[in-house]
Image (cartoon, grey):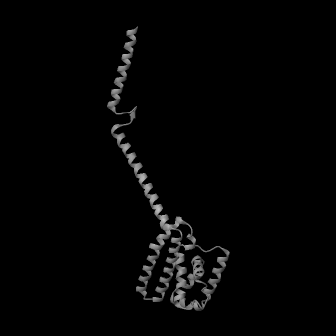
Amino acid sequence: MPAVTNTTDLSTFQSLAYYFQNGGLWNYLYSRLPGSQAYLQNPNNASGILYAYQTLGDPKNSGQYNSPYSMLIWYYTAYYANLYPMPSALQAVQANCQEISTIINVSLPNELTNSATQFVADNNSNQHIGRTIALNSYISAFNSLYGNLSCDTYLANVATQNAQSAAAAASNLATQNEVAAYTATQGTTVLGIPVTTTNIAIVVAILVATILGVIAMKKNKE
């Protein structure tokens, strides 16, 4: 996500970045999760960091954030909030229901699977627990948003509309194909008569005979 531009949010992020720079209790996290300190000070990650701040509280609260678990949960909440849109950014927009559904049912479950795979590789239970709690919290927030937007009903209606549109398009195509097939075999029609080579010859012959008959009748009258 891009860096924040709102003055208040920017000021909050700068305060947090300054705190993370000095370390304090969070040095414990930095020593066990390489790159985490730089991540928490990077303005490009500000949106996710502010999301963690708004949902989990101030990381400067030493009474709340004084254990590996609490720090890791806060960090991974900020981390995943930069990978996927924050629930608040999609609120009250039903057009995003499909995206929300994909995040709930595909993206975040895949992250949980990746976390479990990483745990097998590094056997770091603290990090695995931190990732799992952060992801499940994120899934819960999106589930609430999905329910509030009545996404099941919305997506069902969209599916029905899409099916009806597809059926109409298929019917229209079938009609066009029938017309094309008839035209290819029968030709077009004039006054209800199919215009084919044979029919044209017959019509011409009839017209010639009619004209000759009219001429003959005139001569007889004279």
Residue 69, how many percent across, how many down? Answer: 51, 89
Q: In the image, is 171 to the left or to the right of 151?
A: left
Image height check: is 170 above or below 78?
above
The quadrant the C terminus occupies is top left
Q: Looking at the picture, how far across and down is residue 213, in whole percent?
A: 36, 16
Numbered circles on residues, count: 0
Residue 169 visible in the displayed image: yes
Residue 203, position in %: x, y? 35, 27
Identified at 52% across, 85% down, the residue is 73
Q: Is residue 218 above or below residue 195?
A: above
Q: Which residue in the rendered view is the most extreme toward the left?
A: 198
* Residue at 35% over, 40% down: 184
Residue 35 visible: no
Q: Residue 19 in the image: x percent, y percent?
A: 63, 86
Q: Quadrant of residue 114?
A: bottom left
Looking at the picture, does residue 125 appear above or below residue 213?
below
Along the viewing direction, whichever of 211 and 22 lies nearer the viewer: 211
Q: Is residue 212 left or right of residue 102?
A: left
Indicate the quadrant containing the N terminus: top left, top right, bottom left or bottom right: bottom right
Q: Nearer the viewer, residue 149 or 30?
A: 149
Q: Residue at x 35, y 20 (%)?
A: 209
